[in-house]
Amino acid sequence: MEYKRIFFPLGGGGELRSRIHGALLIGKHFNAHLEIFKSQARPSQIMKFDNSLPDTVLKELNAMTKERLEEEISEHETIFKEEIKKIGNLASSKSKNNTATATIITGEGFRSKLIEEESKYCDLVIVSTPHEARITATFETAVTKSGKPALMFPRKMKKFSTEKILIGWNNSPEVARAVSEAIPLLKNAKKVHIISSKKYGKDLNQVSKLQSYLEDHGISTSFEIVKTTKTPGQALLKYAKDGKFNLIVAGAFGHRGLKELMFGGTTKYMLKNSDIPIFMAH
């Protein structure tokens, strides 16, 4: 399966331009249609109005709130158009030609609910790394509620490539699904390397089965057991950086929720320190 439609929920916070830029790079790489979703809160969600106020005052307050929201959307669209022009070979609307396209879509209401609904109609969800590694409702909803694979990318990303891919194998259902969902990426990669720890790689027969499965898809792999550290996620990220890998494929979270990532540890280290995109599945 190709990733023909990609969904990017644009949360709040800083680095707006760089996040839009990163999303556009991914859309262009896959030659896909990228939907950048911007939610608009209803005026009543932003300001609690006293209904006992005169109608003229209520109307004025609503108008002020609506104007503020429109200014915000206008700012997003301006940055969007500027970044499309900067990257090049991207159209700002859907095209029947074999060209990567992107558009901003909006919805009004509670962001998490909107994202949960809108993210179902795509092949891949992409999310930027949460600010200061704090898992927001936007981030968790996008990754856990869409039923789609998710690709997390750094908030500041200047280029995107999938030439060298590292699989962090821990024998979990989550990473097994992530590997299957990543088949289109793995098939086109120049190098695919699998690493595991002693805890999860004790039964080498399981790894051999994984390699055999990937070989059925025409994917050649190499394998290595790595030594872990007391900091969960550190070994995986260090190996990826030292090996100059472009993408990590890992199980995002298990039954404990979005607090687990690779080798049974918390996501915090990865979220805070990774400058490498991570492909995940739930």
Image (spheres, rainbow, N blue to C red):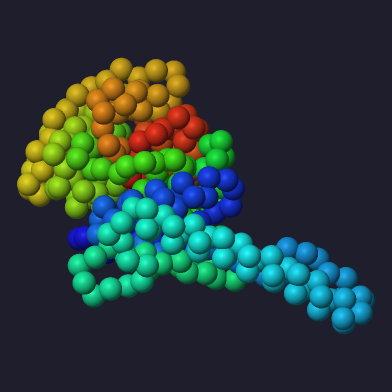
User: Residue 152, relative to residue 31: is it above or below?
Assistant: above
Q: Is residue 174 visible?
A: no
Q: Measured from the top left, where is residue 54 in percent x and y?
A: 92, 79
User: Residue 110, relative to residue 242: is it above or below?
Assistant: below
256 on left or right of 91: right
Q: Measured from the top left, where is residue 60 in percent x and y?
A: 81, 75
Q: State the residue at coordinates (31%, 61%).
A: 90
Q: State the residue at coordinates (37%, 64%).
A: 102
Q: State the residue at coordinates (69%, 70%).
A: 67
57 on left or right of 116: right
Q: Measured from the top left, where is residue 68 in percent x and y?
A: 69, 65
User: Residue 30, relative to residue 54: is it above or below?
Assistant: above
Q: Measured from the top left, where is residue 227 in percent x and y?
A: 30, 17
- Quadrant housing the N terminus: bottom left
Figure disc tally = 0
Along the line of sight, which residue is nearer the eye, 252 or 162?
A: 162
